[in-house]
Image (tube, rainbow, N blue to C red):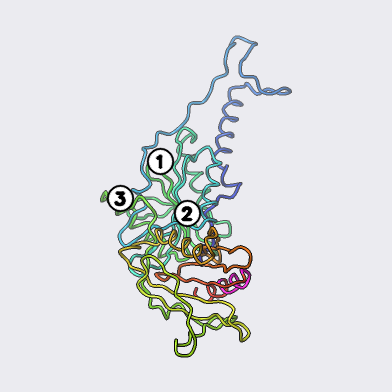
């Protein structure tokens, strides 16, 4: 996760906790009726004794009120952005559970300063797969449990009972709203509690969140991109009077651009560019991803761009054919950063070192 650990995915043991409890309940019911069998598989009918006919079944299942995830992905001063590919993949693993019919994963940001606060996961539950409230509670506690921390505990938040667990990786708070299980995780216990408090307050007030992911873009000056990087020096491009400068790559919605040479071992190995963008064109980071892919592709002679996760960021990579230039594009807050040059391996090294230094 960025700087946060990715805990979005379930452990196999916890994922099937509710199913195991349900199986145990059914087993206990069968034994209490005196119908335990041995040898072959358990029959579905009784063909001996006075009670011939189908075996009795236990009635179960919960009626859970359907709630749209946007009703809980809300809260004053909060924004919910697109998860990393690894986080989405981990969230999708919950769909293997019969209790879960849909998942929505988001990263939680503060609108005040754009800071990444934590991660939110909303599981849409199938009440028919949950035998009773005890099984639901066990499922919630299993999902909320930190593998390296304290046992889950009940906490009162905004007059509601939620489940909280704390471990070395941070805090997890989970609660049920209708047919939704909401899980919020992050490094800071206070921040995560505030997120849940604001979610519940907005829900009570009937204030829904945005239907699509929205990652806030924090405006930064161009110079903020050119931090000190141990393995590369960002050297100013000389004036036109000294030597012909490279032409800045065009980008739709860019408001300013600054270029530098990436110097490694005294040689210019890459050219790097930083852009500021128009907030009217890109009010959120999500529409910017397509522009990043297009920028990288255009600088690589039209080669297709692929999004690759690098140190908690998505980098658009495009490699030119037959020795033609390649390019890498990624976002830092409200800046777009582009690295181009002939050697894809060199580009990858610069990007990794640059991202590590920007964090």
Query: On the image, numbered disc 2 is attached to which residue?
Result: 153
How many numbered marks, from 0 up?
Answer: 3
- Answer with left or right where residue 166 lies relative to residue 69: right
Asked whether 289 or 302 is in front, the reply is 302
Asked whether 307 or 73 is in front, the reply is 307
Looking at the image, tell me whether mark 3 or mark 1 is earlier in sequence order. Answer: 1
Residue drawn at (36%, 61%) of the image: 284
Query: On the image, numbered disc 1 is attached to which residue?
Result: 179
Which secondary structure type mostly characterizes the magenta part of the structure?
helix
Label 2 and label 1: CA atoms lie apart by: 21 Å
Range of residues picked out in magenta: 344-351
Query: Dividing the picture into quarters, in which one does residue 221 lie?
Result: bottom left
x and y percentages locating residue 207 in the rendered image: 27, 51
Asked whether 53 or 112 is in front, the reply is 112
Label 2 and label 3: CA atoms lie apart by: 28 Å
Q: Is residue 136 above or below residue 292?
A: above
Residue drawn at (50%, 76%) of the image: 272
Q: Secondary structure at mark 2?
A: strand
Label 3 and label 1: CA atoms lie apart by: 16 Å
Q: Is residue 332 above or below residue 160?
A: below
Query: On the image, numbered disc 3 is attached to which residue?
Result: 208
Q: Secondary structure at mark 3?
A: loop
């Amino acid at each position: 996760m960025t700087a946060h650990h990715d805990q979005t995915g379930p452990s196999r043991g916890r994922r099937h906790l509710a199913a195991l409890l349900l199986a145990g309940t059914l087993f206990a019911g069968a034994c209490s009726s005196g119908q335990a069998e041995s040898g072959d598989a358990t029959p579905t009918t009784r063909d001996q004794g006075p009670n011939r006919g189908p075996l009795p079944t236990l009635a179960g299942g919960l009626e859970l009120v359907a709630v749209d995830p946007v009703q809980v992905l809300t809260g004053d001063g909060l924004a919910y952005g697109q998860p990393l590919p690894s986080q989405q993949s981990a969230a999708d693993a919950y769909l293997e559970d019969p209790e879960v019919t849909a998942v929505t994963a988001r990263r939680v940001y503060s609108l005040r300063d754009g800071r990444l606060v934590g991660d939110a996961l909303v599981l849409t539950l199938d009440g028919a797969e949950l035998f009773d409230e005890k099984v639901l509670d066990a499922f919630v506690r299993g999902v909320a449990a930190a593998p390296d921390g304290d046992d889950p505990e009940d906490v009162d938040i905004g007059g509601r009972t939620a489940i909280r667990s704390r471990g070395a990786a941070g805090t997890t708070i989970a609660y049920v709203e209708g047919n939704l299980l909401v899980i919020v995780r992050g490094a800071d216990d206070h921040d995560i509690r505030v997120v849940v408090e604001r979610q519940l307050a907005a829900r009570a007030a009937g204030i829904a969140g945005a239907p699509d992911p929205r990652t806030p873009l924090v405006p930064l000056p161009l110079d903020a991109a050119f931090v000190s990087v141990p393995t590369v020096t960002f050297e100013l491009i000389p004036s036109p009077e000294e030597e012909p400068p490279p032409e800045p790559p065009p980008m739709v919605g860019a408001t300013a651009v600054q270029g530098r040479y990436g110097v490694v071992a005294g040689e210019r190995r890459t050219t790097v560019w930083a852009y500021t963008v128009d907030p009217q064109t890109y009010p959120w980071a999500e529409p910017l991803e397509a522009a990043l892919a297009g920028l990288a592709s255009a600088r690589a002679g039209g080669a297709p761009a692929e999004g690759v996760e690098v140190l908690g960021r998505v980098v658009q990579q495009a490699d030119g054919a037959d020795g033609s230039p390649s390019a890498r594009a990624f976002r830092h807050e409200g800046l777009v950063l582009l690295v181009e040059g002939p050697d894809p391996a060199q580009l990858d090294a610069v990007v990794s070192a640059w991202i590590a230094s920007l964090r």
